Amino acid sequence: MPEGIGDFGRAGITLRPMEARGPGGEDPRMKQLLEVLGFVALVQGVAGLLSEFTDLDWGFVHRIGFLDGYETYASVALLVLALALFAAAESRKSG
């Protein structure tokens, strides 16, 4: 082996096992974070669509000024984002 490769002791680098990780090195907190963000996006997307098509006045999409006139598109985009976040969370192995 060439000099310097694999000699971490002389460089002052100590190798230690990764903490709070699954068997493949995944972080179970990342899966939970993706699921929570997906849930929030789902709720806000549904709330935005309900706001547009009914007299309900809740959710954040219709309160954002630069989205005036594009609330329906933003709500659908949030629903698509929620599906993508759920798919990303599902693709991660649970720890």
Image (cartoon, rainbow, N blue to C red):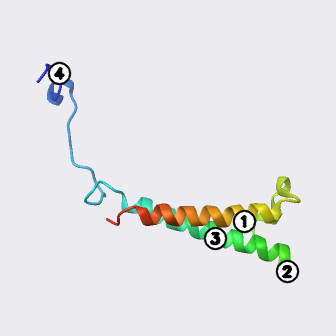
Q: As displayed, is residue 43 above or below residue 73?
A: below
Q: Position of residue 56 (x, y in %)?
A: 83, 79
Query: Disc 3 marks which residue?
Result: 42
Q: Which label sits in the foreground, 2 or 1?
A: 1
**Quadrant housing residue 91:** bottom left
Give the CA separation, mark 4 to mark 3.
Answer: 51 Å
**Quadrant housing residue 27:** bottom left
Element at label 3: helix
Element at label 2: loop
- 47 left or right of 36? right
Query: Disc 4 marks which residue?
Result: 4
> Measuring 77% from the left and 70% from the top, which residue is drawn there?
48
Q: As displayed, is residue 50 above or below residue 37?
A: below
Element at label 1: helix
- Point out the tag, 3 or 1, that comes first from the N-terminus: 3
Assign the C terminus to one quadrant of the image: bottom left
Q: Residue furthest bottom?
A: 55
Query: Disc 2 marks which residue?
Result: 54
Element at label 4: loop
At label 4, counting other C-alpha atoms closer than 10 Å, the crowd grade (few under 14, some 14-19, many 20 or more) is: few
Give the number of the disc on residue 13: none
Give the CA separation, mark 4 to mark 2.
Answer: 68 Å
Q: As displayed, is residue 85 above or below residue 18?
A: below
- Point out the tag, 2 or 1, that comes first from the N-terminus: 2
At label 1, counting other C-alpha atoms closer than 10 Å, the crowd grade (few under 14, some 14-19, many 20 or more) is: some
Amino acid of disc 1 = Val
